[in-house]
Amino acid sequence: MSSLALLQYGVFLLVVILLVKPVGIYLKRVFARERTWLDPLLCPVERAIYRVSKLDATREMNFRQYSVAFIVFTLIGTLALYALLRVQQFLPWFDAAHMTTPMTPDLAFNTAISFTTTTTWQAYAGETTMSYLTQIVGLATQNFLAGAAGLAVGMAFIRGLARERTPFLGNFWFDLVRSLLWVLLPISLLGSLLLIWQGVPMNFHPYTEVKTLEGGTQLIAQGPVAALEWIKNLGTNGGGFFNVNGAHPFENPTPLTNVLEMLAIVVLPASLTYTFGLMVGNTRQGWVLFWAMTILFVAGLLLCGWAEQRGNPALTPYITGGAGNMEGKEVRFGIGGSVLTAITTSNGATGSYNSMHDSYTPIGGTVPLVNMLLGEIIYGGLGTGIYSIIMVALIGLFLTGLMIGRTPEYLGKKIEPPEMKLLALYTLLGSIAVVTFTALAVVTAPGLAGLTTNTGAHGLTEILYAYASSMANNGQNFAGLSANSPFYNVTTAIVMLIGRFGLAIPALALAGKFSLQDRRPMSIGKFRTDSVMFGTVIIFTAIIVVGLTYFASLSLGPIVEQLHLG
C-alpha cells in the first residue's frame, strides 16, 4: 500500500475525529431546542411551516405514534414519487430522444421505494431514464426528506435511552423539520457551492453532441448535477445523477471533491455518537461507540487497500510499477481514493461509489459486502447508524450477562425478556431477508437471468451483494447483475422495506421500553459500558454474529473465488 494512500486515510480520519465533538454538540442543541446561531433566520420559517401544516410540534409521541408518523410520511412520499415517475414523459424537461430506458411500473415501484428508504438502489441509468424535473423535484427532494426522517428516528431512539419514567420519545414532525432546516439544507447549500467551484455542472442545458478526435460523435449528458450530488451523500442516500455515479467527472471531478463527499457521508453519523453521550449524561459512552466504529472502519480500509494494491497474482508480474488492481477504477482517484470511497460508502449506507466494486479482487470486494452485512454499525446511515451500533452493543451485553450470570444493564436500565425479544427480532429480520431472497434468486429462472456476464462463485456474490445492499439501505451494487427486471425490482424493493421499517420500528419499540425504566446507579458488580472492554465486546459481537449468519454464503461466493484466484 502506498504512503500517499496511507496519508490520505490518516488525514480523512483526523478530520472526522476533529469534527465529531463540535458537530455532536450542534446536533444536541438543535434537537433539544437550545439556542443556535441559525435560530434568528430559521425559527420564523419553522413556525410558518407548523402554522400552514396545522401541526402541533409541542405534542410528544410514544413509540407507536412516532412509528405511525414515520411510516405514513414515507408512504405518502413513495406514492408521490411513484406518480411522478409514471407521468414524467408528459412533463417539462423530458428529452424523449435521449430517454432510452422505459419507466415501467415495476421499475417505478422499485425506484420510489428505493429513494424514500434512502437506499437509492438504481436499476437504471440516470441520464437515459430521468428528466431534469424528475431528478430535482422527485429524487433530490426525497434525498432531503428521507434523510431527515432517518435522522429524526435516530434522535427519538437516543431520547428513549436518555429519558426515565416517560413513554414519550419526542415529536416526529418537530424532529423532521429541524433535521431539514438546521442540518440538511444549510450544509447542502454550502456543499453544493463547493462542488460548483470544483467543476460540477449546475444547468438545465440540453445534452451536447460533440465530434471526437476519431471523427465520430459523442453525446455529453449534463444538467443540475450539483443540486443532487451533495445531498445524496449528506443524507446517506447515494443515488447518482449519472449511471456510473461518483466515477463520472461531472459528479466527482477531483480528488478534493472525493474527500469532501466522503466527509459529507461520515461526519454527521459519527457525530451522533457524541450527541448520544451528551444526552445520556456521559460522553464516554459516546466515545466508546465511536472508537468501536472507527476500529472496524480502519480494519476494512487497510484490508481492502492491501488486497487491491496486491492485485491479481496472475497478472502482477506483467504490470510495471506495482500499479495493483486498477480495473474499474478512475486514474484521478487511484487505488487509494477508490478504496476510501468503497469503504466509506459501504459503511455509511450510501451507495455513492466512484469505482466498480464488481472489478475488485475477491478479498477487496468482500470487505464492502461484509460492511453492509454488519448492518450500518460502522458510522451507518443518518440516524440509523446510531441505533444500529447500540442494538449490537445490547446483544453483546446480553451475551456477557449470560457468561457471568447477571441481568445485563445499559445506562442503568435492565435488558430483560421483552427487550431481548425485540433485539432478537431486529437481528433475525435482516439475515432472514438477505439469505432467503438470495436463495430464491439462485434457484429460479428469473433470478438467474440477471447473471448476464458472470456465473459460478462471482455470480453468487453479485446476487448476495444486491440483497445485502438493499437490506442495509445502501444501494451500491456489483454492476455485473442485470437488475432491471420484474423479479429483482420487486424482491429488492421488499428487502429495502424490511431494512427500513423492519429495523427502525423494533429500535423505536426498544427505546420506548427503555424510556419507561428508572436509571439504576452503577455498582461495583456491574459491567461498565463506558470502558475499553465494552468497546471490545461490541467489535467481537458484530464479527461473531455476521460470521455465524453469513459464513456459508461467503464461503460459496468470494472465499471460493479467492481460492481459485490463488
Image (cartoon, grey):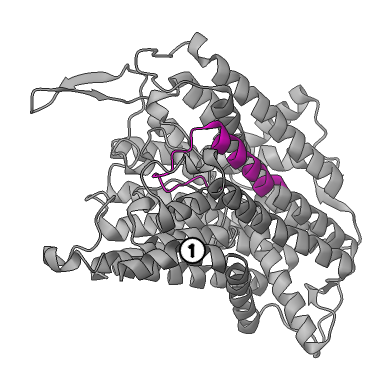
- Residue occupied by mark 1: 556
Q: Nearer the viewer, residue 351 or 49?
A: 351
Q: Is residue 20 left or right of residue 83?
A: left
The question of residue 548 being in magenta is answered with no
Q: Which residue is drawn at the image coordinates 78% and 72% (left, top)?
A: 411
Q: Nearer the viewer, residue 186 or 335?
A: 335
The question of residue 500 being in magenta is answered with yes
- Label 1 element class: helix
Question: Quadrant location of the C terminus?
Answer: bottom left
List x then y, in percent, for residue 119: 56, 43
Q: Which residue is drawn at the image coordinates 31% and 35% (left, top)?
A: 250
Q: Which residues are magenta?
A: 472-501
Q: Is residue 434 left or right of residue 91?
A: right
Q: Nearer the viewer, residue 443 or 13?
A: 443
In the rendered view, would you say 558 is above or below 114?
below
Amino acid under disc 1: Leu
In the rendered view, would you say 151 is above or below 532?
above
Q: Can see residue 458?
A: yes
Mark 1 Cα shell of 10 Å, populated few (<14), some (14-19), many (≥20): some
The quarter holding residue 108 reads top right
List x then y, in percent, for residue 315: 19, 64
The quarter holding residue 68 reads top right
List x then y, in percent, for residue 64: 85, 45
Q: Which residue is drawn at the image coordinates 65% and 79% (left, top)?
A: 534
Q: Can see residue 117?
A: no
